[in-house]
Image: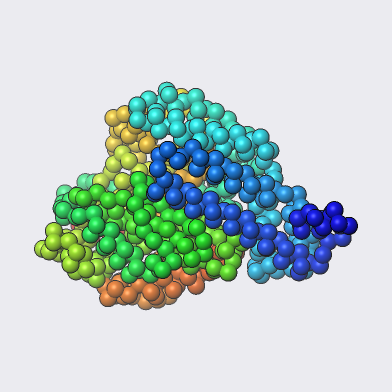
Amino acid sequence: MPALLALPRHKALAAMSSMPAPAELFDQLCSHARQTGLLRSVVGLLEWDERTKLPPAGGDYRAEQVAFLAGEIHRRQIDPVRGEWLATLADSPLAADPDSDAGAIIRLMRRDYQRETKLPQELVEELSRLSVRGQQIWAEARGADDFAMFLPVLDQTLALKREQASALGYDATPYDPLLDEFEPGETTANVARVLEGLRDALAPLVDQIVGSDRGPQSDVLQRDFPEDAQEAFGIEAAAAIGFDFNAGRLDRTVHPFCSTSGPRDVRLTTRYRRNDFGDAFFSILHEAGHGLYEQGLPAEQFGLPLGEATSLGIHESQSRMWENQVARSRAFWQSMLPRAAARFPALADAGVDEFYGAVNAVAPSLIRVDADEVTYNLHICIRFDLERQLIEGRLAARDLPDAWRAAYESYLGVTPPNDAQGVLQDVHWSGGAFGYFPTYALGNLYAAQFFAQAERDLGDLPTMFARGEFAPLLEWLRANIHRHGRRYSAAQLAERITGKPLSHADWLGQCTAKYSELYRL
Ligand code: ZN
């Protein structure tokens, strides 16, 4: 049949009456996925370039390049032939053990396929168009401090997100399938349980800290820190914790991020402010934490589910652990402050205790991305409550600015002077990313719970950090988390590693101990 043979291989096979043997079919499925992974990695590289190097006039064509490739990727993902392969393989002996490599790959690919094919093509396209327009209008509205300008597109976005939730299906709340996109397998009810417990326990600690007049000063961080020296020191510190610069790099951008363009190509970005040591340094350590997870995923599984991060919450647990549990510890600065002082004359007279206090100063604030370790989660609790109410139709978008102000007054005791520093500060909702915010707080809690277990397994981590030894912790993360890719969900990882479900207990315990000492509570 020459006509059939001229078709792409998988089309030709599907057109035949019988499927090949499961092992052959599985290989075919994996090589198809690896090719999709190639396309995805090219998109990653184009997006990295767009945010670091692209001249402004190149933006329109870049948008076309990315949209074209995204369309190709989506078309490959929803190809009914893949659905047939997956259905056949799901009934084969290869899928009998859901935790085996093949079993996990089939199970996870089938989950993704079912999710993606539930969405009508028109809805996917409409969501993607509205996301681009929403972000443009949001940027203008934020610049003009004009929520009314943003309101119509926000209302349209909410309507489409509810439509998306209906298409995906849910039992309890339309927020469930939206959350599931970022935190697979997680439920709104469980996140609400965990975050409400955290919020109630955190309020008294924040009150005590704010009420203390014996806390640390942070002016040592506002001295003169030339940008080139900040960059060199950021690279030195990221390399010290184990980031492999032979398989990664650090560049400049406006909003820091980490992106992966291949199994041995993980890129970090940051920005520098000359009189602010903490802004760039902790963003580099944060992004390097993301990068260590990416570098720790099995390279031979690139493009397959076992070569991917399991959830945004787990991704964030890695960045937060290196940023907070490690780089905001006293022990870390025992080894790193002399190295910093060698690069910055401004730090010649700085002491470890002074510096450790400065990088841990707490102050309730208006802006999430500038928040300290303690109050950060309250910013997330506010957003989780509000976006759930919006999606469930319990809060009208036009009432959002008032609800935002009321929440900031009650949770953080601060009042936004305008919407630009209030409800318009984050890009997420304008791009349709409802269900994303809670993953930041989940990441903080997973980080603390994993770190507590690492201390039980590895012994005295602070003594190691004080000697500049970070490899034992990294190896522990590689063995327990990174090497599994998506084999286990976030909740399964917590159970397997720590023997208990996610809770706020370890996070609260660590913060209470640390800040009681720093603020002499
Ligand atoms: Zn992050």
Q: Residue at x 59, y 54 (%)?
A: 39
Question: Is 21 in front, or is 102?
Answer: 21
Question: Which residue is at the far left?
Answer: 349
Count of numbered tags: 0
Name the side, left or right, on which 279 lies relative to 92: left
Q: In the picture, residue 168 is in which quadrant? A: top right
Residue nearest the viewer, comparing 286 with 502: 286
Considering the image in quadrants, where does the C terminus appear?
A: bottom left
Q: Residue at x 49, y 24 (%)?
A: 152
Q: Residue at the location (31% across, 39% down)? A: 366
Q: Is residue 505 above or below residue 78?
A: below
Taking the image as drawn, is residue 453 in sight? no
**In the displayed structure image, the side of residue 156 where residue 361 appears, left or right:** left
Q: Is residue 436 above or below residue 500?
A: above
Outermost residue, top direction? 148
List x then y, in percent, for residue 383.
Answer: 43, 40
318 and 307: which is toward the camera:
307
Identify the residue at horizontal 41%, vertical 68% (top origin): 246
Indicate the colouring scheme.
rainbow
